[in-house]
Image (cartoon, rainbow, N blue to C red):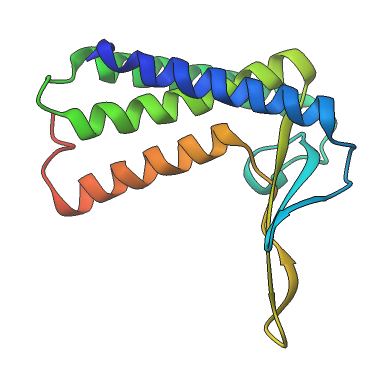
Amino acid sequence: MLGWLWVTALVIVLDQLTKWMAEAYLEFAQPVAIFPHLNMTLAYNYGAAFSFLGDQGGWQRWFFAILAVAVCVVIVNWLRKLSKTRVAMAAALALVLGGAIGNLIDRLMYGKVIDFIDVYFDIPFVMDNYHFATFNVADIAITCGAMVLVFLSLFTNDLES
């Protein structure tokens, strides 16, 4: 099912284009309001999701890069062996692969991942100005692909192959 790699390529292009635009038009840590509860805020992540291990001495750049390459190899192998009838799984894997490669490019080129989508909630007495972790298009693709894979594993037999 390598025919689904166009989805991967599309994710990579959109991810890198939006990150380039964020760096070109946004100032670091200066939010630009787009809609209520949505800002564009340039941020850099030196770690993994939610900046996990981001404050370490730099070794995590290579650790997460090697981990991303390993994940990409596994996904490409999985896609190669996947039956043509497993469309949802192929699409989900292609999304995860595109997101992993998009963030890998950042890690290798800049030593950090460029984030810029800033979602926040303002519910008085519950979540006063709560900002979710800033993220990017690659993160969206990884999350959507992973959610489809979880759904397939829980509610179908589509992961069996």
**How many discs appear?**
0
Residue 113 is left or right of residue 49, and the answer is: right
- Could you say where residue 126 lies in the image, as x and y percent from the top left? 67, 83
* Picture residue at 82% right of the left edge, 37% below the top: 56
* Picture residue at 36% right of the left edge, 21% below the top: 75
Q: Quadrant of residue 28?
A: top right
Q: Nearer the viewer, residue 137 or 89?
A: 137
Q: Quadrant of residue 119?
A: bottom right
20 over 120 or under it: above or below: above
Outermost residue, front side: 35
Is residue 68 among what the camera can see?
no
Q: Nearer the viewer, residue 43 or 19?
A: 19
Residue 125 is left or right of residue 103, and the answer is: right
Is residue 126 among what the camera can see?
yes
Q: Nearer the viewer, residue 24 or 86?
A: 24
Q: Quadrant of residue 112?
A: top right
- Could you say where residue 74 lies in the image, as x and y percent from the top left? 37, 19
70 over 133 or under it: above or below: above
* Picture residue at 26% right of the left edge, 26% below the top: 90
* Picture residue at 74% right of the left edge, 13% below the top: 109
